[in-house]
Image (spheres, rainbow, N blue to C red):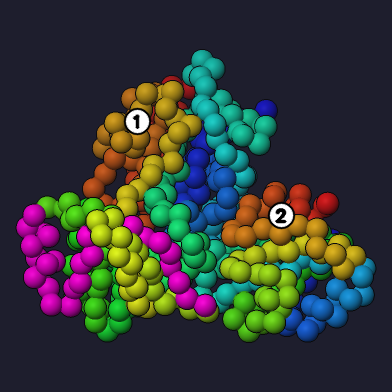
Amino acid sequence: MEEYDVAIIGAGPAGMTAAIYAARANLQVLLLDKLAPGGQIVNTAEIQNYTGMGTIEGAELAIKMFEHTQELGITFDYGTITDIQSEGKVKKLICEEGHSYRAKAVIIATGTKPRMLGVPNETKFAGTSISWCAICDGPHYKNKKVIVVGGGNSAVEESIFLAGLAEEVTIVTMLDLTADPSACDKLRAMKNVKIYEYHDIIEFFGTEKFEGLRAKSSKTGEEITVKADGAFEYIGLQPTADAFKSLGILNDFGYIETDAFMATKAAGIYGAGDIISKHLRQVVTACSDGAIAAQSAAKYIEKTF
Amino acid sequence: MAVTIREIDGDELEVLLAKGEGNILADFYSKTCGPCKMLSFVLKDIAKGIDDVEIVLLDYDMNKEALEKHNVTGYPTIIFFKNGQEIERMKGLQQKPVILRMISA
């Protein structure tokens, strides 16, 4: 079984930054991902708020970050971790694919995944005309029409942001607006905003390019068609943390609780990026978490082994 | 050991398939799609270590007839052909070992 100083689970911005910092601390690093490098940014058309990059495609930034890890000789492998077990001070990582690894410290950076509606054509337009990040992709819709699906805080806040850019924002939500009342009032007062409450999404449509969505009122049964250039979904996030439940490091919402050093309650296990309980989930904050987690892991290894 | 990835159009794909021999991995992609770009990166990595599969790229937006003929409804879609016959297809970004298993069928 292969042994490393640090195993990093998840090769998004947090995991890749952790890998870079850990490698530069002379640690033997294993970087794992279940799919491919990049994480959520692969699904982001353009990133315009990562310092120094100006505007960069999400996939391009992911590739640049991954190439940076490879320049440092970091071992990358594919694996879906199903469990982390303790063997004395050492951690054993069990992979769904059948193999396993040992490491002195583990950094979990598995991120979150957006909840999806599961309606027809959603997958077809995901990452191009359907987005989960208004800050990232909103500027594409300047003077265009967009749809926002959802009615919680994220949906309302992002709708307000989008209404400042887009010609028209149509909110379609399964219930009513459940965000903070002041935010809801602000949104309702905006002239270029339409709100359809208590509507279930039937499908997105568009032959070659995205054209809009169809929804049905759960109160009257009446169907509506909303035409737009793109859509944003805010129906919640889902932490990718099922494999770590037995460690006792998750909060009630399934996110990893960490301290300022990205340490969890479990010795030698750190969290970084979107998977941890935090207020702002952005590439830049994920990278910051990764750097701190790697430094903390290095100090832990030095002290413990 | 390595193969070159090349861009072709739908007509060229049909010519390749009509020969009825060899292994072809066709990647239907879009220039505007992030997962397509990452898949392309993964395919380039795969291409370095194989020599018996031809990897071809088809622009989803430029090859409508090929989409209809092969019932491709989204991108990225990869289809593995052996001796002119479709063996398997996958939609979305895939991990390297999964694609390697697919083309070793």
Mark 1, Cα crowd under 10 Å, few <14 / some 14-19 / many 20+, is many
Q: Residue at x 39, y 42 (%)?
A: A239
Where does the magenta region start and end? A181-207
Helix, strand or loop at label 2? It is: helix
Nearest the camera: B57 or A124?
A124
| Residue A70 falls in image quadrant | bottom right
Three-letter code, disc 1: Leu
| Residue A171 falls in image quadrant | bottom left
Name the chain letter of the residue that bears numbered label 1: A
Q: Which residue is mark 1?
A: A250
Q: Residue at x 67, y 32 (%)?
A: A98
Percent position of residue A156, x then y: 20, 60
Percent position of residue B30, x then y: 57, 75
Percent position of residue B5, x then y: 74, 72
Residue B99 numbered tag: 2
Helix, strand or loop at label 1? It is: loop
Nearest the camera: A168 or A304?
A168
Between marks 1 and 2, how big is the CA–CA gap? 34 Å
The relative height of residue A115 versus residue B78 in the rendered view (above or below) is above
Percent position of residue B13, x then y: 79, 77
Q: Residue at x 35, y 77 (%)?
A: A227
Name the chain letter of the residue that bears numbered label 2: B
Three-letter code, disc 2: Ile
Q: Residue at x 39, y 65 (%)?
A: A131
